Image (tube, helix red, strand yellow):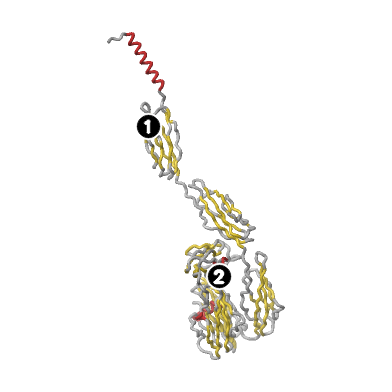
Amino acid sequence: MRISRKVFSVMLVALLVLCFAQASMATELSIVTRSLNEGTVGVDYSERLVASGGNNILWAVVGSLPPGLNLSSNGVISGRPTAQGSYSFLISAATDSYLVAVKYTMKINPAAIPLAITTQYLNSGKVGVPYADSVAANVTGVTWTHSWGTSGNGGLTFNNDNGTITGTNLTAGTYTLTVTANATGAASPVSKSFTIEIHREDIVPIDIITDNIPSGIIGTPYSTQLLSNKDEATWELAYDTTLPGNLSLSADGTISSSGILTATAGTCDFIVSATATDAYGRETTATKEFTLEIIGDNFAIITTALPDGTVNNDYNYVITANQRENVKWEVNDTNLLPEGIVLDSESGALYGTPVKAGEYGFEIKATWGTQTDTGLFILKVNDASTPTGALTIDVDSLPDGTQGMSYRGGQGFQLTHNQGTTHSEGVWRLVNGSLGGLRVTESGLITGECGTADTYTAEIMVTYNGQTASKYFTLTIHSSGFKFAIDSSTTGAFTVPINTTYRHQFKANASNVKWSIVEGDGALPDGLRFSKTSGLLAGVPTVADTFAFTVRADVSNPDVDFDEEEVIITVTSSEYGSGEDDSGDCSMGLSFYALSVLGGFVLLRRKH
């Protein structure tokens, strides 16, 4: 069929109009999303890309997305990033008619910090004593919130800015503090609850711990210090008693003569009282009777203590008697002197260069004409690496505990060192081993509930005034059925030769035992002395007779009862042997005897 020129022209115009209309209806494709959100390592990520100007858009990545992420064909970036960093790549969007692409840079942040509160416990406090402690976390920049339990805060204040707990006007009780820590970059806040005990310090009765005082020698200055278990005790004579001659008692417990002693030879009994007031204004008083022997023209050694020596350093100290001329000196057993030290027989000088650290006990005999006197001494030789004044922990042992019980009835046990005013300042901590469930507070108090019955070894350290000292301790926790008792093998009946050095060690099945002789059950043999701290009975018996008494042992734990055992000592008139205890407990030797009895430099004398 032939189409006329006119019809063809009309058809061509219509086709062009249709094509122009379709072209004018099409819109240019574009990607609307111009930037991507940041991601975090280990945290799920999802973001949908948006485009305009087309349907059935197909998305694709040119290059590499951050590790762990993928792009779906419908424009969703998802996954869990595995590595931090900044990543650049192209993402394209395409239809049947168009293809466009945009370059992106995505930042992947490091993994969120696992926030933790690192403080394990808070110290206990005392009424009337300012309190200070704090909580801490494993990151910086922490912000805190807190709440107190139903008992209130007891006068304590928590600082949300720095996590410190302070207070002055404290109320006795147990208080619960719950703290919440939050920090920028942390995965989530973390909370922890603490218990703070504020207790009123129980009154501890004052006790006069000096057992006896040295004799006074006419014509020689006299001075001795009475001691109590309270630092700030006030001393005075009691019951209208007086001191002999020109002796007087000062308020700090010093008995001294004004110049040389002027008195009448003999013995004088007097009573002293010591009074102390605690932080709450409560007052206790203790009294004790002493016997002072005044020596006239009798010959006697008047040196009562020796200064310390140091390894590899020269030592020279003169022991003196109340007679200065024609005195002969000797050591009963030279093997007990520190190696490198000798005694000059003419001057009484101990001199030389010690080569080994330790504490050495020995007996020195002085002869003047027909009179003799002997004295037991301790010479402590310090290690050369330990300078004078070095910080040391001066507690030697820990009281036993009982399984399932609060340690020492809830009172705890205070550690002390040799420096400062209260001898407990500084920061204390347990650095090795275990105390069977007990803990050491920063103030040096061992407290808590005793765990499983066993023997534990632990190293405790204190830092004070720029110095650090540590010591290993052994702690025994007994089973709940433990029965405290004196070792019966160390009690009973014993025979002792007169005028011969005698020593006998009483023992018990616990540590930190306080010993005593029960009043009203007889008397000790004349010439023997009993140590309340070590349970050692020692000296030179001077009267032949039979003596019966009761020895008592108290352990420093209020959960444990005391024990008492009867002892009978018969002093025979015959002198035999070398002074060894015929009870069979003879292996300790003179050196151990001196260490036990002469702690605090107490001098025992034997006269012939």
User: Where, by quadrant of the figure, is residue 9 drawn?
Assistant: top left
Q: Residue 262: where, in percent of width, then height?
A: 69, 81
- Residue 519 visible, this angle: yes
User: Where, by quadrant of the figure, is residue 88 drawn?
Assistant: top left
Q: Residue 110: where, in percent of width, then height?
A: 45, 45
User: Where, by quadrant of the figure, is residue 207 drawn?
Assistant: bottom right
Element carrying mark 1: strand
Q: Closer to the camera: disc 2 or disc 1?
A: 2
Q: Residue 22: where, in percent of width, then height?
A: 39, 20
| Outermost residue toward the right in this view | 240
- Residue 416 visible, this angle: no
Query: Where is mark 1, residue-wise?
Result: 58
Local packing at callout 1 (Cα closer than 10 Å; few below 14, some 14-19, many 20+) is some
Query: Where is mark 2, residue-wise?
Result: 559
Residue at horizontal 54%, vertical 91%?
A: 574
Query: Is the residue 207 above or below the residue 156 in the image?
Result: below
Local packing at callout 2 (Cα closer than 10 Å; few below 14, some 14-19, many 20+) is some
Task: Tell me the quarter of the image containing the N terminus.
Answer: top left
Amino acid at dot 2: Asp
Element carrying mark 2: loop
Q: Quote the CA–CA distance across marks 2 and 1.
A: 83 Å
